[in-house]
Amino acid sequence: MIDRKHHPIDPWRLRENEVELENLAQSESLFALSNGHIGLRGNLDEGEPYAIPGTYLNSFYERRPLPYAEAGYGYPEQGQTLVDVTNGKLIRLMVDDSPFDIRYGELHSHERVLDFRSGILQRDADWTSPGGKRIKVRSRRLVSLTQRAVAAIEYVVEPVDQPARFVLQSELVANETQPPLSNDPRVAAALDSPLEAVSHDRDDEEIVLIHRTKRSDLLMAAGMSHEIESPGRIAVDIDVRDDWARTTVICELKPGQYLRVVKLLAYGWSSLRSETAIGDQVAAALAGARFSGWSGLVEQQKMFLDDFWDAADVEVQGHAELQQAVRFALFHVLQAGARAERRAIPSKGLTGAGYDGHTFWDTEGFVLPVLTYTMPDAAADSLRWRHSILDQAKERAAALGLRGAAFPWRTIRGQECSAYWPAGTAAFHLNADIAEAVIRYHTATGDDQFMEDVGLELLVETARLWMSLGHHDRRGRWHIAGVTGPDEYSAVADDNVFTNLMASKNLRAAAEFAVLHPAKARALSVDAEEEASWRDAATDVYIPYDEELGVHPQAEGFTGHAEWDFEASRGYPLMLHHPYFELYRKQVIKQADVILATYWCGELFTPEEKARNFDYYERLTVRDSSLSACVQAVMAAEVGHLDLAYDYAYEAALIDLLDLHHNTRDGLHMASLGGAWTALVAGFGGLRSREGRLCFNPALPPGMTELAFSIRWRGARLRVEIRQDEVTYAVHNGADVEVTLMHAGEELTVTSAEPVTRPVERRKPLLPRPTQPPGREPLSALGGNLPV
């Protein structure tokens, strides 16, 4: 767990006022910058000390084999691993003959600040060299949200008390030595110098290095250009080799003088374009960056973020730490998807190489809800990426003997990369999660052209998969057998409630949108008979129910399984201390499953069913997954346990700032960060979308005096301000814009001229607050316990 005493709480910034070498990897993730295309871990400018160097390009990967002890038909044969590409962050500094390294000499002060409103990482250091020369260094770093291929660093150094000679070396370095990121030797082999030099080029203004991966045959280019400012004489030298390039700047400075270097970086890659084209692309990006200059890039960044925060900010009154955490979360979710532009959004974003840089259902389930309501174009682009890999998904379905599309459980470029089929291939609910994201996006935006272009086809091909998987029994009930739901401690089960309900929703939506887009439906060979079969299956879907307990079994027979002996557990996460065989046949849950169904399909459950289900499954859920706390927060709030919901919201938001899962070093948990927004906006704000309508039913927990947030809804920017006893809805982007919404069942029309205020009803739980498994109580929002 990270000690926050060196991270003062600030509502709009993440600050670190002391370097903790033992937590360097975690801070590199926390201070990472990205725009969805380029990702720079928060390494120190000088490159050392470091824990995990990291410069990433979205979807730029290397292939590796996936051997099996026992081969099976349909097993994936190739894995994919995100590559650490050419590092352009490096700016090494010599002060007389002493390298600037915070581990030597005397470090008087060192502060780093990540500003969520400017998108800039600033670093200030005051240091005396072993030779007695005291200097100050200030650097500012950004990854441009407006110029997709560009990053930039401003580096300023000045002597404090006596003259000094400075030698600054700005570098591009490929094939950096990597620490072990996995126990899998195949991963290590794939990452051992994965880049082969193709060519390099330089002139007086820029340097470009071009490399190719050895197995995946992807081509990339990295370029740098510099602006140098200093009084007096300056010497500049440039050296370029296959795997590195260096621009050296030499000058002598007196106290009161400074050397300022602006380093402009550009990156590009392709699987199709030529070496010449990639090189020219990067050169053009550098030219554009030079035209803007550092001040122009800074201003563009601020304008972009001003617009984002105007439509996305969440204000929490009464909990300063949660306020900081939710803005930190929103900033990183934005960075993950802002300029991904039809490439995957990985589960770690581009903050680290955890999970090999793969994308899971996390994206559609937890990241896209945030982007849909705050930056819908990014959500649409992510779904267009899913559509771009539709052919691979259809090939995968055919290999499994199924119709339609079987989207990969984990992937970078569209091929299935999960070598463990019970948790991968069998988790077909991913298809319905994608369909849900399509429906959510269209409902929130009304973007019919999106449905015509890609949305309907995604719904149709996912629906066809469900028809291949499901069947009617002799009683006319429709079943889906042998699948894995969201809870990965229960695999290959029959009639998983979440899967069945979501498949039913997918099938209904496919039929409805086929009617709305008849020409496109015909082009996809959808006819009236197929539509009718979808509607029949959706209507006849079987949903298990335990009459004796009054709850929905997670899957058929689940409530009859033996209960897990928590007292005999050997530690958490359970999967690292117990065999999956034991987990699969007992009542123990890794992450919200039925509870997620009661959230996403809430209209299909009564309030009493929600309360009983929450009570039952709360006692079994160990939250060994980062995807769970936010869902439990939403449903705890809905069934009236507002204090418990507060704890879960706090845990979801602080997962990386406190390193609660002890793996922040490998990258941030984008799903949980997105879930922090969901916990607040859907939990305490009560945001739902029901039958195409925007619905709210807010209630705040004790201790939270006010919650305010903005969302985008069909071209409007709606602001919701919730207090303990009332809520105000207002539109703030145009006099002629209005929003019709439901508040606690009452229809309201809101305009910028006429905000609407309504009372908030006190919410009382139907059942007492449930307990959690031993040692798995959520982190208290109001203090008093520490994570296990």
Image (cartoon, rainbow, N blue to C red):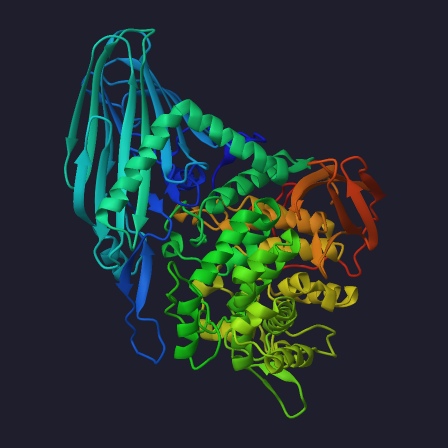
Taking the spot 63% from the left edge, 46% from the top edge, the residue there is 780
x, y (%) of residue 177?
23, 45
- Please report the residue visible at 65 percent of the width from the left and 80 percent of the height from the top: 532
Q: Is residue 5 left or right of residue 780?
A: left
Q: 603 left or right of 155?
A: right
Write down the quadrant of residue 217 in the picture.
Answer: bottom left
Give the image quarter of residue 605: bottom right
Name the residue located 65 percent from the left edge and 72 percent from the top edge. Answer: 508
Give the x, y percent position of residue 585: 53, 77
Q: Nearer the viewer, residue 740 or 452?
A: 452
Residue at screen point 29% across, 61% down: 184
Is residue 665 visible in this depiction of the protein? yes
Is residue 338 shown above or below 466? above
> Between 343 and 554, which is closer to the camera in this rendering?
343
Q: Report whether 579 appears left or right of 508.
A: left
User: As rendered, which of 676 and 369 lies closer to the eye?
Assistant: 369
| Residue 408 located left or right of residue 677 | left
The x and y percentages for residue 609 are 75, 68
Residue 271 found in image quarter: bottom left
**Up/down of 201 relative to 414, above or below:** above
Of 244 and 281, nearer the camera is: 281
Which residue reaches farthest front? 519
Instruction: Please count the marks in the image.
Output: 0
Residue 588 visible within the image: no
Which residue lies most toward the bottom here?
474
Residue 156 vs 217, above or below: the answer is above
Residue 300: x percent and y percent? 48, 30
Image vertical order of residue 563 relative to residue 219, above or below: below
